[in-house]
Image: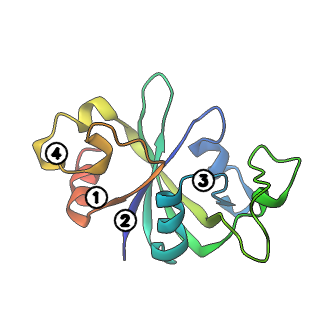
Amino acid sequence: MNYWLMKSEPNAFGIDDLQNMPEQTEHWDGVRNYQARNMMRDEMKVGDQVFFYHSNCEVPGIVGLMEVVKEGYPDFTAFDPNSKYFDEKSDPAKPRWFMVDIKYLRHTRRVIPLAELKEHDALENMALVRKGNRLSIMPVSQQEWDYILGLE
């Protein structure tokens, strides 16, 4: 099993939105970064555990846990001219962008703020706390995962 962190702005799609989806499951669309796309397309597997992270908000931080329930498949929003994620260069016969389906597991007992995560030496190598890392999807080691759950 792998562990991940996926970011979303709560005013666009937050943890409560996922919880309120039918079957508490939704596709994670709109990722338009090749490195993040590659992780979803090639590395994320059914059963992988994921931190839901609220970004670009008053208190950015980890707010919940999710699980990958469908492995990478073409992001159909790239083919829809009415979608904000439309990419005219993406072709259904040779898709450029991919997504996974994720399922809500639970909220964390509290928001675990980025500022707090940065204070822990045990997390100093975590991609999230390194300067300049702006990826919306990133791997988390099992040690980091366990440590963060211990902060709840």
Q: Which residue appears farthest toward the left when viewing the image?
A: 121
Considering only vertical position in the picture, is 9 above or below 69? above
Give coordinates of residue 92: x percent, y percent.
Answer: 79, 72
Which is in the foreground here, disc 3 or disc 2?
A: 3
124 up-or-down from 67: above or below: above
Disc 1: CA contacts within 10 A as few (<14), some (14-19) or many (>=20): many
Closer mark to the observer between disc 3 and disc 1: 3
Q: Position of residue 14 (x, y in %)?
A: 60, 41
Quadrant assignment, res 73: bottom right
Residue shown at 47% from the left, 21% from the top: 58
Q: Is residue 93 above or below residue 139?
A: below
Direction from residue 79 to residue 53 in the image, left or right: left
Instruction: Pick the quarter of the image with the N terminus.
Output: bottom left
Residue 99 in the image: x percent, y percent?
63, 64
Element class at badge 3: loop
Name the amino acid type tagged 4. Glu
Q: Quadrant of the C terminus?
A: top left
Label 3 Cα neighbours within 10 Å, binned few <14 / some 14-19 / many ≥20: some
- Asked which quadrant contains residue 134, the reply is top left
Residue type at mark 3? Val
In x, y percent, where is residue 47? 47, 76
Asked if labels 1 and 4 touch by Cβ distance under 8 angstroms, the answer is: no
Badge 1 amino acid: Trp
> How many angstroms separate mark 3 from mark 2 (CA)?
18 Å
Residue indicated by mark 2 = 3
The reply, left or right, for residue 136 in relation to residue 73 is left
Circles 2, 1 touching at the beta carbon (< 8 Å): yes
Provide the secondary structure element on which disc 1 rests.
helix
| Amino acid on which the number 2 mark rests in the picture | Tyr
Say which of marks 3 and 4 sits in front: 3
Q: Earlier in the sequence, mark 3 or mark 2?
A: 2
Q: Earlier in the sequence, mark 3 or mark 4?
A: 3
